[in-house]
Amino acid sequence: MKLEVFFAKDGDCLLLTSADGHHILVDGGRTASFESQTRPVLQDLADNGAPLDLVVVSHIDADHISGIIPLLQDVAAWEVHDFQVKEGNNPTFPEPKRPRPPEILGLWHNSWRAQLGDLAGPISAIATQVSEAIELAPRSDAESTGPARIALTSIVDLTESISDGIELMSLVDDQTPVPRNKGFRNKLVRLRKPIQRRHFGSLTLTVLGPTEEHLDDLRKEWRKWLEDLLGSGRQAGPRGDGQGSAGGPGLGLDGLLPAGPPTSRGEAEALISSISNAAEIIAESNAARVTPPNRASITVLAEEDGKTCLLTGDAAEDELLEGLAAAGRLAGGPFRCDILKVQHHGSENNLSTKFADQVHADHYVFCGDGAHGNPNPRVIATIVESRLKGPGRFTMWFNCSEDRTIASRREALAAAIKEAQDAESRHPDRIEVKVLDDTQPSFAVEL
């Protein structure tokens, strides 16, 4: 088993390859990094006639999904070309400008609407309106501080993520022959009983999450977020008449959401102010964690010949531990895996000693470039403290260096890498730190 970890800016982009030559792409990172770092590797697969057995898009955040969009656009373009030549009696139909990508035999992704149902429309509407308000009144946004600033930034990021998610669904379901979530009930990839396993040659993937319970909790958090955002005491609940509303089908949001995008600076400033005021209230339950749809991440355990690789997306620790317990991996002490892709870029919101004490790895992979303070030095310290309780050496891998990231993120990333390197200097017989060379597109962890 080999895990190739690409430089992906602030996102994730991983290629898992089995010993017998099966390939699984997990997330795509940002578009620019995908085009420059990942696409050449995938083109080599295509040139050698090797397909991607599976593409896993863990969730809709733009730092995971954006790079997949151009890949699927190329698949769609070549599908049109092949149809015209083979079925349309049009042998001179021009080839697409970019080379034919590898064939994609399947894709796992839970759509935004499948996860959130009737909440998808209102959340999308709010995100769009806030983004357009900030374009009209950027100074008002810049003057926001603390929880308000975090909330506004999260909502703007969400706008891009929702747009990418909608485009992904259109490409997969309407413009390509790639089957989505094949074999999963209701086309929703999640933890079920009996536990779901899929085989790709000698490689087995076990689905650990999300669970239906966590998706229900996520919907409740989103509903509360909307209600807090729209005003105290106003419920984002079903309408009695069952008809649609300005906020989306089946939600009682008439008169609560703005009628449409702001059309003046005054309207924009008023909307930004309302979000900022709400954020001060929501801060107690940590709005920054509620707004991104990280808790809906598809998480899997890859296994081959006794070797294991835990792929976590941006999931929270409780969801990961619940999935591992359901798979029978937490009985009799900590789960020992060969590779752990540390969840949510090493965010302190997603990992504590609770997780680090129960999951020990030989290789800890951090995907992040300092954005949002990730990887967080406290997470690295937590992992080191917990892992030193167990036997054996372990390696901490970073897919971005201080010099490779943008200037505003260098201090945060440097602090994270320094935390790991200081631990290495204290325990040279137990810890090794590796940072991706700035001239390389990726590093590979081979088992």
Image: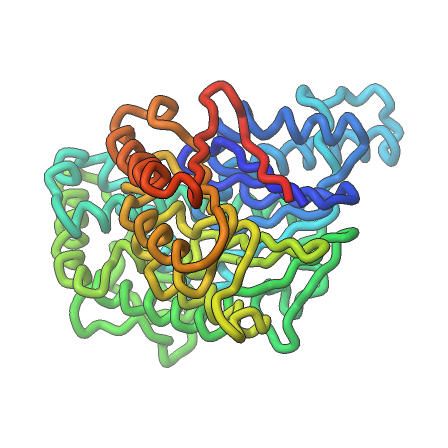
**Residue 63 can be seen in this image:** no
As rendered, which of 247 and 288 lies closer to the eye? 288
- Answer above or below: position of 276 versus 228: above
- Answer above or below: position of 339 versus 231: above
> Residue 382: x, y in percent?
32, 54
**Residue depicted at x 54% and y 30%:** 442
> Quick check: 147 left or right of 174?
left
> Residue 106: x, y in percent?
70, 50
**Residue depicted at x 23% and y 39%:** 134
Write down the quadrant of residue 101 in the picture.
top right
Looking at the image, the residue that sits furthest to the bottom is 240
**Residue depicted at x 19% and y 62%:** 282
**Residue depicted at x 58% and y 73%:** 328
As rendered, which of 256 and 6 lies closer to the eye? 6
- Answer above or below: position of 428 versus 287: above
> Residue 246: x, y in percent?
34, 61
> Quick check: 295 left or right of 92?
left
Write down the quadrant of residue 242 in the picture.
bottom left
Looking at the image, the residue that sits furthest to the front is 429
> Residue 211: x, y in percent?
51, 70
Tally of numbered tags:
0
- Quadrant placement of the C terminus: top right
Write down the quadrant of residue 97 in the picture.
top right
> Quick check: 89 left or right of 233?
right
As rendered, which of 97 and 364 lies closer to the eye? 364
**Residue 148 can be seen in this image:** yes
- Quadrant placement of the N terminus: top right
